[in-house]
Image (cartoon, helix red, strand yellow):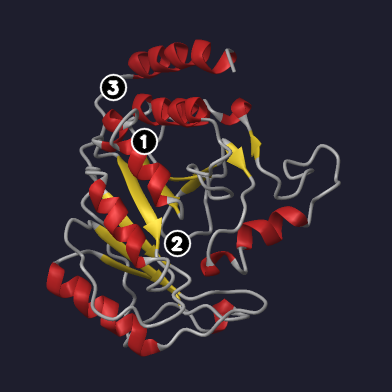
Amino acid sequence: MADNSKIEWTDATWNPVRGCTKVSPGCKHCYAETFAERWRGVKGHPFEFGFDLRLVPEKLADPLKWKTPRRIFVNSMSDMFHEDIPEDYIAHVASVMRLADWHTYQILTKRPKRMEKLLTGRLREAASAPHIWWGVTVENRKHGLPRVDALRRTGAAMKFLSIEPLLEDLGTFDLTGIDWVIVGGESGPGARPLEKEWVVSIQKQCRAAKVPFFFKQWGGVQKSRHGRELNGRTYNEFPKPAKGSTRTSEEKLRALAEALPMISSL
């Protein structure tokens, strides 16, 4: 787990899985792949195997060890619903999130069909937990907007969209049942352009639907040059957080003890 994440909308990251594969245009300039591949072949480094998909069971218990509540981006370096991650392992990740309920978890996927299947089935209790926020990436109309419908069908208590990298004008789309929207442009080498009109359109739709709107960045090859302001202001809106856990320190330690047999069996 990494504390003090540089991602503007979270506090920390937790990666019980590392690595992924591309599924849509939003993956073209994947920041996670670029970072991971820098370390391929470096023995002992977490990304010794580059961006190859790998389970990391020794990281499963990390949130249980963090006593101070945080917003945690789950699998910032992977996709929890990747087809090669065993369903049992995904269930273990969900169990830890349910046990360490003093944190808020943010999960994003570009694989909505598997997410829908699990959240309406085996992970139904995790889907209904208000401290676990389930989201999909929306980069364009063809690949991104159908994911929104799949997210709605999960019936999750908290549903959000990460519209990043925004690659085209999405037009008018349905925000029914959506609790939060993040928008951002692509950054780094080869970054594709973001038009202001596209962002303003989404911001106005969020305002009309009373959905919190978070503008992450304009992006570009040097994103720091362009900043985060939209029409003279910074949008840092968040959903109303779930009621914090009332677990005592002793109860938290029991939660950790409960999780350890599950984790050690992997």
In three-dimensional space, the C-alpha distance between marks 3 and 2, rounded to whole angstroms, equals 28 Å
| Residue 161 shows in this picture | no
Residue 32 pos. (x, y %): 62, 57
Q: Is residue 50 left or right of residue 131?
A: right
Who comes first in sequence, dot 3 or dot 2?
2
- Residue sitting at 56 percent across and 78 percent down? 223
Q: Are marks 1 and 3 in contact (CB under 8 Å)?
A: no
- Note whether 72 is above or below 25 in the view shown: above
| Numbered badge on residue 150 | none
How many badges with numbers are in the image?
A: 3
For label 2, the SS is: loop
First in sequence, mark 1 or 2: give its number: 2
Q: Residue type at mark 1?
A: Leu
Label 3 is placed on what type of residue? Arg
- Residue of label 3: 247
Location of the N terminus by quadrant is top right
Q: Which residue is mark 1?
A: 118
Tell me the distance, in whole angstroms, between the alpha carbons under discs 1 and 3: 28 Å
Q: Is residue 87 above or below residue 132?
A: above
- Position of residue 3 relative to residue 196, above or below, is above
Q: Looking at this view, is 18 or 239 the one in front?
A: 18
Q: Which residue is mark 2?
A: 8
Task: Characterize the local packing of mark 2: few (<14), some (14-19) or many (20 or more) Cα atoms within 10 angstroms.
Answer: few
**Disc 1 vs disc 2: Cβ atoms closer than 8 Å?**
no
Which of the image's four quarters has the C terminus?
Answer: top right
Q: Which residue is more in the foreground, 148 or 73?
A: 148
Q: To which quarter of the image does residue 116 belong? A: top left
